[in-house]
Amino acid sequence: MAALLLCPPGVYRPQSDSELLGRAVARSGRAPARDVLDLCTGTGTVALAAARSGARSVSAVDLSRRATCAARLNGRLHRAGLAVHRGDLFAAVPGRRFGLITANPPYVPSPSDRLPRHRSARSWDGGRDGRRLIDRICDGAADHLEPDGALLMVHSAVSDVDRTLERLAGRGLTGRVVERLRIPLGPVMRARSALHEARGMVERGTTDEELVVVEATRAC
């Protein structure tokens, strides 16, 4: 991951999920000489990982004005030449297809399906089941991938990995887990432990979670 990143207040600071996805990009060998799309880019850290891996071009997308400003500045700082777009997922790059799509969407199950638009929680709130953005990415990825392209997406196992694989299959993509990492619960997940326990998402007294990176390609 990038050694130095500008991260203004209100922008998601790269954490274990960002690092795991960045490593998956490097290990996959799917970025070199390909056009890459990084959704929910935040500071642009995964977009920079793709650029360092030899991508032909990298487009970085975020709905947050602050995040797009940060990603643009970090691209310049690291001389990566990122094309940064402010917009809602794939709508920011209409009609384009990519050899690799990466995504670290908000995935923490939240009290309501109504997602915040102007608070830091927008970076992690994923709706009641944590899947509001995950499902939209699963649904739209196939239409924006080259025939031999791939999606790499990270999220918590609390948000139901099997549902991700099923959703991708329903859109003609074959998914598999390519990276796993178990970490202590972070501040937001800890604060919502009682909520997640009450919904049966985690066992009582859970103190850690598993992060996964799902890779998806067109079904043969």
Image: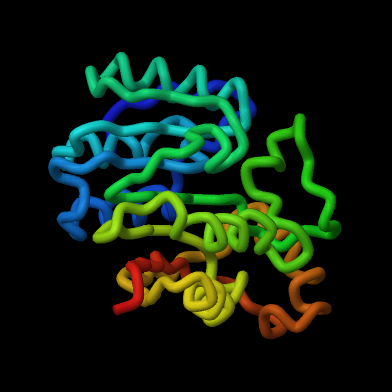
Q: Nearer the viewer, residue 150 or 112?
A: 150
- Of residues 49 and 102, which is closer to you in this image? 102
Q: Measured from the top left, where is residue 125 in percent x and y? A: 70, 51
Image quarter of the C terminus: bottom left
Please give left or right for residue 131 compared with residue 16 in the image. right
The residue drawn where x is 43% and y is 68% is 212
Count the marks: how many?
Answer: 0
Q: Is residue 184 above or below residue 141?
A: below
Q: Can you say whether 105 is above or below 204 in the image?
A: above
Judge from the rendering whether residue 55 lies leftward or rightward of residue 220; answer left or right. Answer: left
Above or below 74: residue 179: below
Question: Outermost residue toward the front?
Answer: 95
Where residue 123 sits, quadrant-wise, is top right
Q: Residue at x 42, y 53 (%)?
A: 16
What residue is shown at x 75% (from left), y 62% (from top)? 192
151 relative to 116, above or below:
below
Residue in the image at 33% along x and 67% along y: 217
Q: Position of residue 46 (x, y in %)?
A: 35, 41
Q: Quadrant of the N terminus?
A: top left
Estimate the x, y position of residue 2 in percent, counting from the top left: 28, 33
- Is 220 or 133 nearer to us in this picture? 220
Q: Quadrant of residue 107?
A: bottom right
